[in-house]
Amino acid sequence: MTPMERAVEMLNGVLQRKMNSLATYLAEASPYVAKTDRPILEAIQELNASERLHAEEAARLILLFEGVPQSGIYDPSVVESNYLSVRYLLGPLLARLEDDIALFEEYRDQCDLPEVKELLAQVIEDDSAHRERLRNLCKIT
């Protein structure tokens, strides 16, 4: 596999995780939100907006490298979680965010293309900031 083919494969991994994340599902599924949990939902919506931007950039780079963007589907484990409270879903969301950050760090370390490394570094930085905000909301609310 050439470095460009490997980069397209990694970028599709980013695209799939960002397009089909738990935050995206929750932003669209309208889980139960108590008044006191409104800040948690707002943080999830901001994470979702960030993930959309990351997905768009990953797709742009895939096309630049003459690959085919493959958005995939939601993980079946998120289906039917919309009836749960947003506070309860915060734990699984943080766990998935941790997994994503670890995977993107692995991708960054394996990639030789500067454009892809730059995107991955930005994704890791943004996801880390969202993770910290969500962790702080766990403590506050």
Image: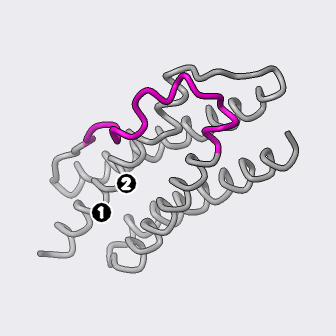
* Pick the front one: 53 or 70: 70
* Alpha-carbon span between mark 2 and mark 1: 6 Å
Give the residue at x 55% y 35%.
Answer: 49
Q: In the rendered image of this protein, does residue 43 appear above or below residue 126? A: above
The answer to whether the residue labelled 2 contacts the one labelled 1, judged by CB atoms less than 8 Å apart, is yes
Q: Is residue 81 left or right of residue 13?
A: right
Counting from the top left corner in percent of width and height, residue 125 is at 61, 62
- Which residue is under mark 2? 14
Give the residue at x 21% y 58%.
Answer: 65
Q: In the rendered image of this protein, does residue 22 appear above or below residue 114? A: above
Q: In the rendered image of this protein, does residue 109 appear above or below residue 36? A: below
What secondary structure is marked by label 2? helix
The amino acid type found where label 1 is placed reads Met
Does the segment drawn in magenta span residue 87? yes
Give the residue at x 44% y 26%.
Answer: 80
Please give the range of residues in magenta: 71-90
The amino acid type found where label 2 is placed reads Val
Counting from the top left corner in percent of width and height, residue 59 is at 31, 46
Q: Quadrant of residue 141?
A: top right
* Pick the front one: 58 or 106: 106
- Which residue is under mark 1? 10
Does the segment drawn in magenta span residue 73? yes
What secondary structure is marked by label 1? helix
Number of numbered callouts drawn: 2
Q: In the rendered image of this protein, does residue 92 appear above or below residue 87? A: below
Q: On the rendered image, what quadrant is the N terminus found in? A: bottom left
